[in-house]
Image (cartoon, rainbow, N blue to C red):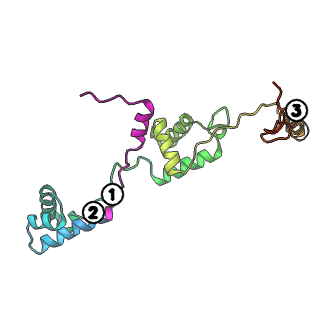
Amino acid sequence: MPEPSRSAGQRRKARSSKKVAARRDFEALRERRMRAAEMFDRGKRQVDVVVELGVSAQTASRWHRAWSAGGRQALAGAGRAGRLPKLTDEQVAAVAGALAQGPKANGFPTDMWTLARVAKVIEKLTGVRYSQTQTWTILRERLGWSRQRPARRATERDQEAIDRWVKKEWPRIKKAPGAEGPGSASRTSPDSPCCP
């Protein structure tokens, strides 16, 4: 039987309701490997590690092989997951310093940062080329920047004239006939005579 089609809203809701995987607790994983190393030190078998620590037979076998080759140190682990960042903390600090000087100081014609411009500065300073998505990740996660949009204002804007209008004209317009809100006295009440 075919599945009923979902509306776009239902699909969007289904996508957004997916759970985000929890980050791994590297210290707990390390402790579990160290317990396995202690068991191997005491002469326990791989099957004992499987039963006591609740790991798969393949994992226990891999741990035993590593323990046999390098002892407890071989089971210590790397302490992190994923690829190492291409930019060192010193390089990120140099990029932050260049960005603080502003776009014009970095050779751009206007005083507004874009992701493409930031990527060019990173490449010029470090030799590492990033896409705009990767550049945004660096700005957000390593430099703590947030997304900003410039305020759109007319260049001939006269703030004093705007303030005068808000103080004098707006109250007059607001009190114009027919602008009364609900429950005002000008409305007919249910007890008043009605015209046909």
The first of marks 2 and 1 along the sequence is 1
Q: Does residue 62 lie above or below 45 as drawn? A: above
Q: Is residue 47 left or right of residue 83?
A: left
Q: Does residue 34 lie above or below 192 as drawn? A: below
Q: CA distance from mark 2 to mark 3?
A: 74 Å
How far across and down, in percent of the image, does residue 133 sit? 47, 38
Q: Does residue 195 lie above or below 13 as drawn? A: above
Quadrant of the drawing holding the C terminus: top right
Q: Residue at x 54, y 47 (%)?
A: 95
List the residue tagged with mark 1.
24
Residue 3 figure quarter = top left
**Magenta residues, start to end:** 1-27
Q: Which mark is residue 48?
A: none
Dot 2: element:
helix
Quadrant of the drawing holding the N terminus: top left
Q: Which mark is residue 177?
A: 3
Mark 2: few/some/many CA within 10 Å (<14, 14-19, 20+) = some
The residue sitting at the bottom extreme is: 42
Q: Residue at x 47, y 54 (%)?
A: 89
List the residue tagged with mark 2.
29
